[in-house]
Amino acid sequence: MSDNSNYRGRIGVLYGGDSPERPGSIASAEAAFKALSGAGMKAVMIDLGDIRELGASLRERIDVALLACHGLGGEDGKIQGLLEHLGIPYTGSGVLASALGMHKPTFKTLLAALNIDTPKSITVLAEHSVESTLTTVELNLGYPVFVKPAGGGGSLGAGIAHDADELSGLLRARRDQPYAEYMVEEYIDGIPCTVGILDQGGLVVLPLLTFETDRDFYDYEAKHDRGLRRETCPAELPEDVQQRVEETALRVHRLVQAHGVSRVDFLIAPDGRCPVLEVNTVPGLSEAGNLATMAAAAGVSYVELIKAVLDTAFTKVSYVP
């Protein structure tokens, strides 16, 4: 791992765009920008919406891109592909890993191929009628079920349905949202757990972080309001469960060919089951966010974390798919 703690190039902190996750992206970008500037580095914030107009001129403004963009357009391989074409180094994973991590049905297919536990699910496309979906759920999953976009994060557009009437309402209410596909998963009553992975001269698993909330589930509001959740880091889990989760997180990181940094989300069920929910190839970078919380528990300051993330732009092999 190279040392860019005194990097003097121009750093573009890319954020925003028109994703539903824009607010979280802005929080990540502002915190990262402040940390870089405070460390004496040359940084500028660039909204993804402006990149359409900047085009190739982006190369004249920045030397490296630190990605603080979440959701559609920023985490799914699209901005990564543009930066590849422009020849601008960027932090984190390449196009393939980003796309695999964002598209949950494909990701879950890969998990199944390696016998990695993940909730059973069906994919709901825009052309699928609500009636046909209800029949498929009844035959394959039963109730309750968890509904979420097939591409997206932050628990936006997600919800629990305890019966066919609730599922019908959830599906109909989501027809006007920007996601083309949804997933309906078996509902597993468990404790949300997230695992941060960071390249520090080799992949390091950060201390595990678990959450509790009095809301129906760990939703968008609970993820962005500390008053609505209780965090434990390092997580208080049985040693065998912790070891299994850590090993699985590393397998998932390598499975999608993630680079440098990722965050893998699990549920810890009372019976010891630890299914994988998703992998985040562009984890949030806010100072109070999950990745920073886990890094702090490992003795890594926030500024050190942002520098380590920046360093991932310079440690890729010559070709990353």
Image: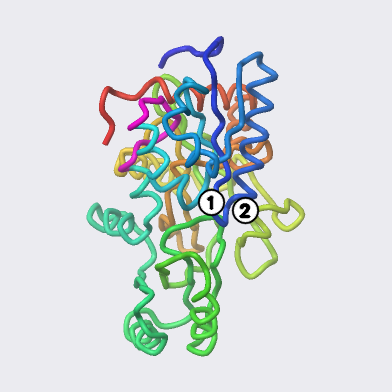
Amino acid found under the numbered disc labelled 1: Cys
Q: Which mark is residue 297?
A: none
Q: Is residue 239 left or right of residue 256?
A: right
Contact flag, marks 1 and 2 (Cβ < 8 Å) = yes
Identify residue for label 2.
211
Task: Say if the magenta span includes residue 57.
Answer: no
- Residue in front for this viewpoint, 279 or 80: 80
Tell me where residue 261 appears, x and y as whole percent: 45, 34
The dominant secondary structure in magenta is loop
- Residue in front for this viewpoint, 31 or 261: 31
> Looking at the figure, which quarter contains the N terminus?
top left
Placement of 166 over or under 109, stated as above or below: below
- Residue in front for this viewpoint, 269 or 125: 125
Q: Residue at x 34, y 24 (%)?
A: 316
Q: Residue at x 58, y 39 (%)?
A: 47
> SS class of the residue under badge 1?
strand
- Residue in front for this viewpoint, 202 or 156: 156
Placement of 224 over or under 91, stated as above or below: below
Q: Residue at x 33, y 49 (%)?
A: 100
Q: Residue at x 40, y 25 (%)?
A: 88
> SS class of the residue under badge 2?
strand
Identify residue for label 1.
193
Amino acid found under the numbered disc labelled 2: Phe
Residue bounds of the magenta highlight? 85-96
Mark toward the start of the polypeptide (1 vs 2): 1
Around disc 1, counting alpha carbons within 10 Å, would you say few (fewer than 14), some (14 to 19), or many (20 or more)?
many
**Real-space Cα distance between discs 1 and 2?**
7 Å
Placement of 148 over or under 42, stated as above or below: below
> Looking at the figure, which quarter contains the C terminus?
top left
Tell me where residue 87 appears, x and y as whole percent: 36, 25
